[in-house]
Image: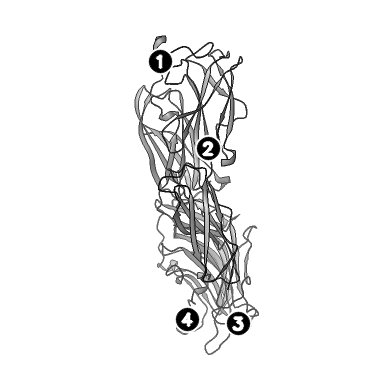
Amino acid sequence: MTSTAAAIPSLCDSRLRTMLGLVCLMLTLAAAGLGPITPARAGEWAQATCSDAGEPVPTEGWVPSTIGGYPANTGDANTCAQSGGSLSLRDEATVDQLPESGPMWVYSAPAFSTIAGGFVTLTLASPGGQAYLATPANETTAGNLLLMCIELCTSVRESTASIWPRGGSKLFAVTECNPLSGKSVCPSSEVDAQMNIKAATILLSSEAKPTAGGFAGTLLDVPTSGTASLAFTAHDEHGPGVYRATVQIDGHTVWSATPDLNEGECVAHGTYEGALKFHDSQPCPQETAVHTEIPTSELAEGQHTVKVEVEDAAGNKATVYSSTIMIDNQPPAPVTAPSRGVPNGNPASDQATVTLGPRQPRTFTRPLTHSAITLTGRLTSPSGAPIQDALVQLLQQVAGTATMTPIATATTGSNGAWTLRAPKGPSRLLRVAYYSHTLDTTPAASVDIHESVPAVISMHAPHRARLGHPVVFRGQLTGGYVPRDGESVQMEILYAGRWRTIEVLPTSRRGQWAYTYVFSLGSGSSFLFRAATIPNAGYPFLSSHSSPVRITVTR
């Protein structure tokens, strides 16, 4: 496998060098009107790297590389973790005097996104070569100069370059030597060219729209009343992640929040040209569970419209759910005993309360092997007295479905206590329900528990492979609930520090899959592979991945 950055040609060929007459020259093309700054629009977010207002920040997306025959791991350093640090480059003649050879830093935008603008603040000098910042003319070749310092720039220059044109996916920062006319090697001076990137704010663009699935909760019951719950899973598979979820009733926002701060990475640090600014290129989770409770007591009785909207970190918004609900907060009309059956418990009550035991969370995530759960709690009357000898039920609604199914029952003891056990299963809504009469269809009291379960996917492959010979990967989805047409699995390889998708393939109805790969390059190297599930509302598990397998390539 060959780094695409290594194929970048020099941006200062002999014709340009002759035309410039080998004088000290610094080109800031954006400042000359060739790189217009355009305001941010929906679908854009900004990433601050190395430094943001003097504060050290991460350098996600920047990878060191070389051009020409310059030795790897030489001439580049990353000191951005400390105050005043930088991404530095230093082409030294004592290391290599070959023409158009030197170290470089390459920034790559996240998958499915492009670079839409921004700026880079840096210092550079080139007493015996050239230093430049460029964007690609295509995916692999630098062709649009942003800033350049050609040989004989003996003093260190500081400048801020605008990033243009929009639409590319890489930035190239390069220092290299270029021999004088008629020479085959560079001068033997100590430094041919050097550069220090002190700060960069990169405007990124993605048109991906968020999605959501697995909607459940008492807000969707017909009718609904009291404090109603709503739960679902939000996705932003090809974008910068889920930033905000909003619930509206009759066009008025009743709840809005960031469902997962992603350990602080999903917190915006101001704005840049109208776009939210973060310290990571992928700031927010691309999949997250959302749970909220909506009080309905202040809403008028009758029909209302509910709408759920999800927004990602780039400002892309999507309405992911829209429906009507019926609010009924009036106490039920008296019903004669024969139509409701016999009372359930002593004393039976239409105003009973079901409570969970201490330290039992209402929302949690567990692996499939530990998804079975024992629930405990009490059933009490409005005065707090225990209701004994009452039947309570445990109902289950699998994520992505609309059916609530009984899975267990228990009878309360003298203190109103009950114990229910749910077998292991997928992501689901569990509801403990008490019906005050045996023929009732609507519970007098209930409590909801939301359980999220990651998918379980295995992968097996040989640990050695020969060039030109096929390698077969095989695996299995465990836990059932695979759709009739199979579930999608994506094969991924760890390359340049990131997992990258190389193929998407379907499983069988039993969750089995196989994939064949042939190595054409990379003899003597080893590579990590893994298989991952793709978020899908029809498959009731959170996305997950297999344990990685390392394969060594031989001839």
Q: Secondary structure at mark 3?
A: loop
Protein image colouring: one colour
Residue 31, horizontal then vertical, whole percent: 44, 66
Left or right of 307 on screen, residue 493: right
Q: Secondary structure at mark 1?
A: loop
Q: Which mark is residue 13?
A: 4
User: Please, which residue is most extreme toward the bottom here?
Assistant: 182
**Nearest to N terminus: mark 3 or mark 1:** 3
- Amino acid carrying mark 4 in the image: Asp
The CA span between labels 2 and 1 is 35 Å
- Amino acid carrying mark 1 in the image: Pro
- Amino acid carrying mark 2 in the image: Gly
Residue 398, horizontal then vertical, whole percent: 47, 36
Q: Which residue is mark 3?
A: 97
Q: Nearer the viewer, residue 394 or 365?
A: 394
Q: Is residue 274 above or below residue 300?
A: below
Left or right of 325 on screen, residue 99: right
Instruction: Please indicate, yes or no, whether residue 162 appears anywhere in the rendered image.
Output: no
**Nearest to N terminus: mark 3 or mark 2:** 3
- Give the residue at x 54% y 11%: 346
Q: Which residue is mark 2?
A: 425
Q: Which mark is residue 332?
A: 1
**Nearest to N terminus: mark 2 or mark 4:** 4
- Amino acid carrying mark 3 in the image: Gln
Between disc 1 and disc 4, the foreground one is 1
The CA span between labels 3 and 1 is 89 Å
Q: Secondary structure at mark 4?
A: loop
Left or right of 486 on screen, residue 382: right
Callout 1 crowding tier (Cα within 10 Å): few <14, some 14–19, many ≥20: few
